[in-house]
Image (tube, grey):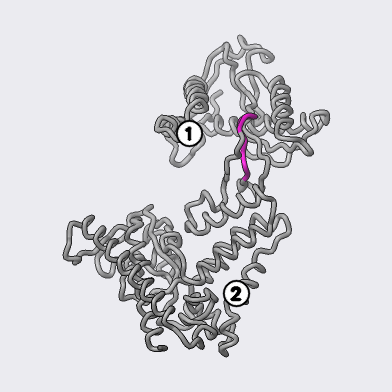
């Protein structure tokens, strides 16, 4: 009789069943769904996907013969990605029950169960054949991570190809196990989160930084986290010296604490889901910004799915402000009259260090102690001047270096240089620095005026990803600091 199949029902006559041989004509999947084999009838999905996957393999093989910096390589890379997405979406629509265009859950479940069975069979084969000298350390969806202990890169390539050849003899066509790459150094943080230096061919001399699921490739964090994490992991993989990694992280954190950074690297851009998807009082930065925009202009509310940029600074009106009260829009930040001050400690302790800890804690490193030692060094001058260390850290006062000896201090001149009798050299240094920044500021302003076609300067730039705009904002701050330093030195003289 009829039975449910996909979004409809299916009826198979007894005559058709009697003409089929259960051993040679029918394939029974691991989840109990029966299909006739290809010599009886080919399915729609196999015909379509076989052509798509074969074309993608051809494109990827061509990419290996082309310079990676060429335009043709980027074009082919985009095409193979399109083919991959078409294949993925086809499978997704097949198994989707709510938004699917051709829902057939039985086919989707069969694909998943069959792939799982293939991987489990490969794992059992590796465990029962120790002469290959390898072990499975991770498996996910359609891939296996296999470790070859005490092997060189050349030996790992040779052993991998032998293993793949043996595994492919277990499966019928068109199922095929494919060797992809070798990780010589890698970090497997958790499920779907790993990173390493990959080698795709035995002749490849330099490893490629390959990351999946960590902050270097995610869009829900800011650029400074991605840059520091990527460079730290590269140093660890290349030098295997955790001391160099620690020095690099401390140097970058010191730059943030001493206001030597590019504001463009500290911007978050989270997706806005629309007012109806949030509670009115939900502590979501994108929602807070959308509400503020709607108060002045209802049409200024971000579209659903649009990414809303913001940064985390200090709230000058509230003493014990929550994090949601410290959200600043870029328009308010880039307003020269604003008192914006970056919450450096939030970015360091809540964004940068946790991302590093998720990778480096696996080798027994406590990255949070690195910044504790750095903060003690930065605030040593404050203790000499009678400042309370904890209070100073809470307020996150901006620190700077002495313009003469480059010692960290809270004033343009440290105590030792301030006691010098002759400050004429100091005056010359301050004057030259201020003049240089004033010239840079004037040049950047001319570039902005030329871009906006307004030489009078009365315009409001709305671009949020223009490096010149952020550079002009930074140079303006440095110029004002240099002018204040020059005034401070003149008063000391």
Q: Determine whether 253 is above or below 388 in the image.
A: above
Residue 197 part of the magenta-drawn span: yes
How crowded pointer 2 is (Cα within 10 Å; few <14, some 14-19, many 20+) is rated as some
Residue 470 % position (x, y): 36, 62
Q: Quadrant of residue 181?
A: top right
Residue 13 part of the magenta-drawn span: no
Mark 2: secondary structure: helix
> Which is nearer the eye, 468 or 324?
468
Question: Which residue does the image show at 56% across and 48% down from the upper left?
Answer: 213
Question: Which residue does the image show at 53% across and 34% down from the upper left?
Answer: 105
Mark 2–mark 1 Cα distance, whole angstroms, equals 43 Å
Would residue 252 be visible to someone looking at this image?
yes
Magenta segment boundaries in residue numbering: 196-204
**Residues tagged 2 and 1 counted as in contact (Cβ below 8 A):** no
Res 375 label: 2
Question: Which residue does the image show at 68% across and 59% down from the upper left?
Answer: 243
> Which is nearer the eye, 323 or 78?
78
Res 68 label: 1
């Amino acid at each position: 009789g009829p039975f449910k199949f996909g979004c409809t029902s299916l009826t198979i006559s007894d005559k058709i069943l009697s003409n089929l041989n259960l051993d040679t004509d029918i394939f029974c999947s691991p989840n109990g769904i029966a299909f006739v084999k290809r010599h009886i009838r080919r399915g729609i999905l196999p015909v379509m996907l076989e052509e798509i996957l074969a074309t993608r393999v051809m494109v990827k093989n061509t990419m290996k013969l082309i310079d990676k910096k060429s335009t043709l390589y980027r074009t082919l890379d985009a095409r193979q990605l399109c083919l991959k997405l078409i294949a993925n979406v086809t499978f997704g629509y097949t198994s989707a029950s709510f938004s699917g265009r051709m829902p057939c859950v039985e086919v989707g479940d069969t694909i998943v169960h069959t792939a799982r069975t293939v991987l489990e069979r490969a794992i059992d084969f590796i465990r029962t054949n120790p002469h290959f000298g390898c072990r499975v350390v991770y498996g996910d969806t359609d891939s296996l991570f296999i470790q070859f202990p005490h092997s060189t890169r050349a030996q790992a390539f040779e052993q991998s190809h032998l293993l793949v050849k043996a595994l492919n003899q277990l499966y019928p066509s068109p199922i095929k196990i494919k060797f992809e790459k070798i990780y010589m150094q890698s970090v497997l943080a958790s499920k779907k989160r790993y990173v390493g230096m990959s080698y795709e061919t035995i002749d490849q001399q330099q490893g490629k930084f390959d990351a999946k699921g960590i902050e270097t490739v995610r869009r829900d964090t800011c650029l400074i986290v991605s840059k520091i994490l990527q460079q730290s992991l590269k140093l660890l993989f290349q030098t295997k010296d955790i001391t160099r990694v620690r020095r690099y992280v401390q140097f970058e954190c010191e730059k943030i604490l001493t206001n030597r950074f590019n504001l463009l690297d500290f911007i978050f851009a989270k997706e806005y889901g629309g007012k109806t998807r949030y509670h009115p009082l939900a502590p979501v930065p994108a929602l807070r910004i959308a509400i503020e925009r709607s108060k002045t202009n209802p049409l200024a509310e971000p579209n659903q799915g649009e990414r809303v940029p913001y940064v985390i600074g200090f709230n000058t009106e509230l003493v014990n402000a929550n994090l949601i009260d410290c959200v600043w829009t870029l328009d308010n930040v880039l307003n020269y009259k604003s008192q914006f001050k970056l919450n450096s400690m939030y970015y360091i302790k809540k964004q940068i260090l946790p991302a590093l800890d998720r990778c480096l804690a696996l080798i027994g490193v406590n990255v949070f102690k690195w910044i504790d030692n750095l903060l003690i060094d930065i605030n040593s001058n404050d203790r000499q001047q009678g400042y309370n260390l904890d209070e100073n850290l809470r307020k996150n006062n901006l620190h700077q270096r002495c313009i003469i000896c480059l010692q960290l201090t809270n004033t343009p001149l440290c105590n030792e240089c301030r006691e010098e009798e002759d400050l004429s050299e100091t005056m010359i240094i301050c004057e030259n620095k201020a003049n240089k920044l004033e010239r840079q500021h004037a040049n950047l302003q001319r570039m902005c005026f030329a871009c906006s076609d307004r030489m009078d300067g009365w315009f409001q730039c709305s671009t949020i990803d223009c490096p010149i705009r952020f550079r002009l904002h930074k140079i303006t701050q440095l110029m004002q600091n240099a002018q204040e330093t020059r005034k401070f030195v003149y008063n000391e003289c």
